Image (cartoon, rainbow, N blue to C red):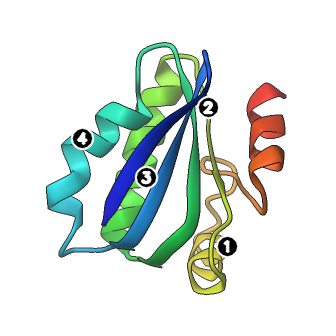
Amino acid sequence: MRFEVVEVSPTVNKLVMVGRLDSATVGGVEAPFTAAVAAEGKSAILDMRQLEFLSSLGIRLLLSSARVVTRRGGKVVLFGAQPMVAEVLTAMALDAVLPHVATEPEAMAKIAA
């Protein structure tokens, strides 16, 4: 998996995730991904439109990153998950910790709420 960080506002970063977030890729992106999501004083929206697969290790990475952001007073919202990835998120009942919505404007609205 690879990701790109885009500053969408002074308080929100967007991470565009591409590829697969699984046991083969988590180790290589864990530290830089967590640092990007948990940027000091910022919330994050995670663009999952190009994420093809999400494993349990990928979910663990998302959860641990979100916990760091929450402790710093920010929020993390996922958006645009492909059907298979959305199904995994729904099945794991993660919406309270990692809310996921369909579009970027919805994600920004959730961050602002």
Q: CA distance from mark 2 to mark 4?
A: 18 Å
Which residue is identified by label 2?
Answer: 75
Query: Depth check: 106 or 60 in front?
Result: 106
Q: Residue at x 50, y 13 (%)?
A: 41
Closer to viewer: mark 4 or mark 3: 4
List x then y, in percent, for residue 34. Answer: 32, 39
Q: Residue at x 58, y 55 (%)?
A: 47
> Contact, CB < 8 Å: mark 1 with mark 4?
no
Which residue is identified by label 1?
Answer: 90
Q: Quadrant of residue 94?
A: bottom right
> Contact, CB < 8 Å: mark 4 with mark 3?
no
Q: Is residue 31 above or below residue 56?
A: above
Which circle's residue, 1 or 4, is located before the other in the chain? Answer: 4
> In this image, 55 relative to 102: left or right?
left
| Helix, strand or loop at mark 2 | loop
Q: CA distance from mark 4 to mark 3?
A: 13 Å
List x then y, in percent, for residue 97. Answer: 61, 47
The image shows a total of numbered marks equal to 4
Q: Residue at x 15, y 58 (%)?
A: 28
